[in-house]
Image (spheres, rainbow, N blue to C red):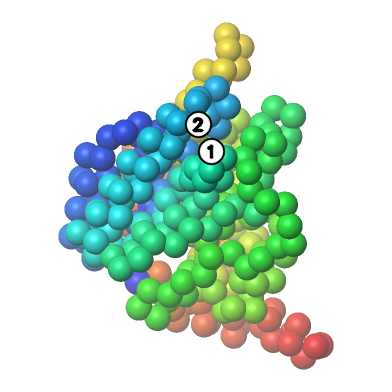
Amino acid sequence: MRVAILQIPSVGMSASKFDYYLRIAKSKGCKVVVLGEYLLNRFFKELEKTPIAMIKEQSDHHLKTLKALSKEYGVTIIAPLIVIKKKEPYKTIVKFSPTSTTYYHQQILINYKHWNEEKFFANVVEPLKAPMIFTVEGFKFAVMAGFELHFDEFFKVISEKNVDAVLLPTVSTFESRERWRELIKMRAFTHSCYVIRANRIGDYQEDDKITWKFYGDSLVVTPDGEIENTLGNQEELLMIDLDKKAVKDARKGWGFKEALTKRK
């Protein structure tokens, strides 16, 4: 199973970049392509100042474009997108496949004073549900938003459903690179699955003192908790071969799930 990570900055309304990279991914046999957060829309701090009608126009444009590109190239695209319903914004991850489009509303949003998505978006606060799970050619994927990686409840489902790979769009910034690396490695190792993190690049200047730098470092971590490949801080396309046998060997070798099953 070959998967691609597309590491780019925010693209505005243009579709040419997606067409270019998806054509390459298709030619190399990729079945799934993952994008980082806030690529199709402006970064969150900019969205707070953007009229809802403008956000909707941009999102509708990308919905139409990525549906068409997924069908044209025969690939599944995982893309975070702000969806507007009844003039309310919802932070969403969309799975575009050649035959269907599926939406996952992020369930736990950042709610810090300097970055309060929970206050801005209309996503419902309710008991947690499973993340988005789908299968491509026998390989089982789960999709969750970057912030959701911090919560154990999601990973109970990852183990219960025997997920082979977690697809993780992020928008990591400031001095968080090493913390994100360690957290991703831990999740991959303790749940015997791949974690594929797609982070964006670029920056946002909030005022004369604060610059939000999105540092890239998109990566793939194996079921043994090792970083197999990673990108730098430039625009790049990373293609990864996922091995079902590596997942099975990790589960059998470490036996974490088996240890829990015995005690139920």
Label 2 is placed on what type of residue?
A: Ile
Farthest residue to the front: give it: 86
Task: Please name whichever residue, 53 or 140, is drawn nearer the observer in this view of the structure.
Answer: 53
Residue 9 in which image quadrant = top left
Q: What is the secondary structure assignment of the residue under circle 2?
A: helix
Q: Residue at x 72, y 52 (%)?
A: 125
What is the x, y in percent for residue 124? Answer: 68, 51
60 over 261 or under it: above or below: above
What is the x, y in percent for residue 167? Answer: 49, 59
Residue 49 in which image quadrant = top right
What is the x, y in percent for residue 185? Answer: 60, 58
Residue 192 in which image quadrant = bottom right
Is mark 2 in CB contact (under 8 Å) with mark 1? yes
Task: Please name whichever residue, 69 or 139, is drawn nearer the observer in this view of the structure.
Answer: 69
What is the x, y in percent for residue 214? Answer: 50, 33
Task: Please name whichever residue, 181 or 162, is drawn nearer the observer in this view of the structure.
Answer: 162
Disc 2 residue crowd, few under 14, some 14–19, many 20+, Cα 10 Å: some
The quarter in which the N terminus is drawn is bottom left
19 over 245 or under it: above or below: above
127 over 42 or under it: above or below: below
169 over 87 or under it: above or below: below
Q: What is the secondary structure assignment of the residue under circle 1?
A: loop
* Labelled disc at residue 87: 1
In three-dimensional space, the C-alpha distance between marks 2 and 1, rounded to whole angstroms, equals 7 Å
* Labelled disc at residue 52: 2
From the viewer's perspective, tell me whether residue 187 is left or right of residue 216.
Answer: right
Q: Residue at x 35, y 66 (%)?
A: 100
Label 1 is placed on what type of residue?
A: Lys
